[in-house]
Image (spheres, helix red, strand yellow):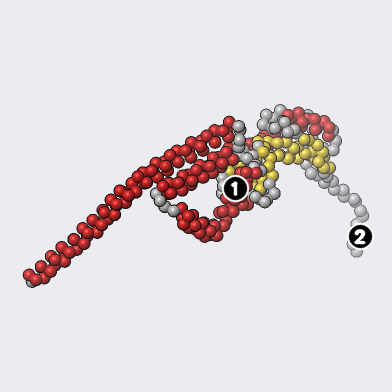
Amino acid sequence: MADNTSWNQAMNQTGLEQELQQLQNVYTLITEFLVKYSFQLVGALIIFCIGLWVASKVSRLLLGLFKKHNIDITLATFVASAVRILIIILIGIIALGKLGISVTPLVAAIGAVSLGAGLALQGMLSNYAAGVTIIVTRPFVVTNTISVLGVTGQVKSISLGKTTLTNEEGEEISIPNKHILGEVLHNSFGNMLVEAKIGISYQADPEQAIAVLEKAAATQPDIDQKQGIQIGIDAFGDSAIELEIRYWAPTQQYYRVKYQTNLALYKALQEAGIVIPFPQREVRIVNQKLPEIM
């Protein structure tokens, strides 16, 4: 029993000495590293911090210059962010060189990883590529009204991956940029075209009706008068002369302006005594003598 106790104590003592030796080795390694690379480490840290400050300063300076010259905010933000990232990458390479770390193998490794990531993320990267094209070529900008793939809305924001639209109901519609690039794109800027039809009786004077409608539409404050109001005969129906009214309304108030204008046009025709007919059909019954039944 005494021999077993002595053996256990010896084993515990040996394990404790090994752990202490490992801690001593780690301490020695850290000390040697700090002694050897402390100045390089501090220098690299200072260089990197200064680089971050310079990158942020340059980015803000570019944004200020773009705003001063009324450059589109989306393009300004993209360029400022790209310059900031480029400066940070360059400063990071300089800081690594200060530590004595070779950048060449690191660049090769990043290239290999980027190739694999590119193959795995083709859809996302195609969105980013399309986003860069949209930002640079600027087929539309924020606050424009666009129609693409059957969707219409006012552009709220443009990012590298997607374009966000909003409508009168406050809904946000996100469209991946790759589905915008290469498609037929309608840009009506800040307004949308309203097309309405109204029928008048064949006994009415079309010129008088057009003048009444023009006067009523001109009093509507939300219609874009600069782009003009078009009113004319669109077709000759079975029961009425069909007049068409075309005008531009703000995208964010499209339906409100449309309904308000329709009511004003209807009241104007009523006050002018111009009849809006309803479809009717004339049926004639010809009396014929029926044959006698035997």
Q: Quadrant of the N terminus?
A: bottom left
Cα distance between the residues tagged 1 and 2 = 86 Å
Which residue is depicted at the point 74% across and 37% down? 246
Q: Earlier in the sequence, mark 1 or mark 2?
A: 1
Query: On residue 292, which mark appears?
Result: 2
Label 2 sits on what residue type? Glu
Which residue is depicted at the point 68% across and 46% down? 185
Q: Secondary structure at mark 2?
A: loop
Q: Nearer the viewer, mark 1 or mark 2?
A: 1
Out of 215 and 153, give the one closest to the viewer.
Answer: 153
Snapshot quadrant of residue 166? top right
Snapshot quadrant of residue 189? top right
Vertical position of residue 29 compared to residue 1: above or below: above
Which residue is depicted at the point 66% across and 45% down? 147
Question: Can residue 92 be spotted in the picture?
Answer: no
Query: On residue 131, which mark appears?
Result: 1
Q: Position of residue 204 (x, y in %)?
A: 84, 34
Residue 151 vs residue 286: left or right?
left
